[in-house]
Image (cartoon, helix red, strand yellow):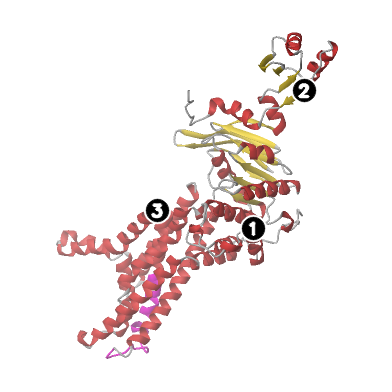
Amino acid sequence: MTALATEPATRTRTVSPYRLTFGHLLRSEWIKITSVRSTWWSLGITAALSIAISMMIAGASSGFGPGFPAVSAILMPTQFTMLVAGILGAIVITGEYSTGMIRSTLTAEPRRGAVVAAKAVVVAALMAVVTAVTYAIAIVATSPLLSEGIDWSEPSLSIVPLAFGVLSMVAFTLIGLGFGFIVRNGAGAIATTVGVLFVLPIVVSMFAMAGESWRWIVDLGQYLPMNAASTLTAPGGEDLVPALLALAGWTLIPLLIGWGVLRTRDA
Amino acid sequence: MIVAEQLTKRFGDKTAVDGVSFTVQPGKVTGFLGPNGAGKSTTMRMIVGLDRPTSGRTTVGGQDYRALRAPLTEVGVLLDAKAVHTGRTARNHLRAMAATHGIPLSRVDEVIRITGLDSVANKRAGKFSLGMGQRLGIASALLGDPHTLILDEPVNGLDPEGVRWVREFVRHAADEGRTVLLSSHLMSEMAQTADHIVVLGRGRVLADAPLDSLVRAWTTMTMRVRSPRAAELAGLVTGPDVRITSTAPGLLDIAGLTAEFVGDTAAAHGIPIHELTTTTGSLEQAYLALTESSVEYKTKEIS
């Protein structure tokens, strides 16, 4: 360590120009999320998986018959990539707990609600941009493979489901983040997220064969995140409000509980 | 200035910190001592708002830490070297910390230079040695040029040069009027660095005093006297509270008397004195005497 003389002798009790602001916090969270490899692994896998599956579906689309909407080829991979989105959301915060970084984070910003909000905004924005770019690449890459291209003149068969696709990926990411704040442990948060996103819909679908008396479980299953997202991204879908509310609930409730947990528990 | 008032922290039925009150004054280095499990780290964590006190309160500069609007410029804190994401480089860690307050990159590079991290700044923190991690933690604490420094075991794992650097740094910071609270298990290091000592044991304050008065109160001053008529002198100064031992002919070790009294007595009787050396106890002796009964994880005496 160098001589102490290099430490500027600004021992003035004047007010420091540096301040905590939400904008600064967003900048900090942006630096954090973009400076660890796990983020780029998650996003890279999401994009590669999404584009590759889209191209496979597009290649096989001629066999689906004339009614197959081209936009579905872009959106169907969401059923798989949602897991990676949820996992990314979870590790953004559980990585801080496992390494102890959370203590640095919370000493820099002791208002814990702001930490939750800043992380949510940054991870949501990043996922939205990456998903939009992924869709754009997938649209270009699949166009030579599709017998019938996307009908851009009809919003309900093009831009609306795509926008809901982006929204769904953001929701899945935030569900993971919320569970991450609640559970704190990486493996636990990922298991919970995968359970809610992927396992519950399968469990529910089993009851479809169980007869009328179990019908209510299947009906309720429509409000699971994945099922709500399927409703939203279905081309030409109608009556989207319940699905939208369900997805919003799944996103906001874990985040609010996570905020409550962060506020009350010791870090 | 850091103030703790009746600070208490319970984890389940275990009381880690039990009604602790003390004040850390600016312009001094205050040493925070205590056996493992005495509640030092928990107290420090409560000061910076990481743990919520069960009861009581702490303030930094008169304010609750959680109410500070620019905490990094008020308090620089090193709680443990492992408060860093292992996948992030040292420089990116400091960039992220600095960004929360809008602290410019030039300051990030400055603290990297001050703490001697230049050569490893672009390495991931997970690859750091304990000493490098410690330097990174100190760099992080310095980012906002804070008025108050709270350093938990800052020299742990540092090389001798780093240890000396920390000592000079905290002395310099205190001389500039900053408030410094420092914990360490290295008594000799603490004796060289601290002005004031707060000792915790089993979650309570055992002592809160200036370093020299603490040492004086908890150790006995001994005196070594060399004289050709040692036995005669011993007979003259002996008394109920006086302990005299002799390890060699002509040599006395006396406890419980002042050098003035022994010297004057010898002069009055014409006894020649060849050596009269007083030795005050060390901080370590004082500390061990203080915490004797409150060591939670006591090592068995080897007989």
Q: How far from the left and from the top, in percent, is residue B273?
A: 80, 18
Q: Amino acid at mark 3?
A: Asn
Q: Which residue range is magenta in the image?
A: A146-169
Q: Is residue A111 visible?
A: no
Callout 2: residue from which chain?
B
Q: Which residue is mark 2?
A: B275
Q: Residue at x 54, y 54 (%)?
A: B133
Q: Which residue is mark 3?
A: A185
Q: How far from the left and from the top, in percent, is residue A192?
A: 33, 57
Q: Which residue is mark 1?
A: B143
Q: Residue at x 46, y 52 (%)?
A: A260
Badge 1, how many Cα within 10 Å: few under 14, some, many 20+? many
Residue A162 drawn in magenta: yes
User: In the visual, does A104 lie left or right of A72?
Assistant: right
Q: Quadrant of residue B206 in the image?
A: top right
**Mark 1 → mark 2, Cα distance in angstroms:** 53 Å
Q: Secondary structure at mark 3?
A: loop
Q: How far from the left and from the top, in percent, is residue B22?
A: 65, 36
Q: Quadrant of residue A190 in the image?
A: bottom left
Q: Compared with residue B30, is residue A145 higher up or lower down, i.e. above or below? A: below
Question: A118 or B256: which is nearer to us?
Answer: B256
Q: How far from the left and from the top, in percent, is residue A18?
A: 67, 61
**Mark in the foreground, 3 or 2:** 2
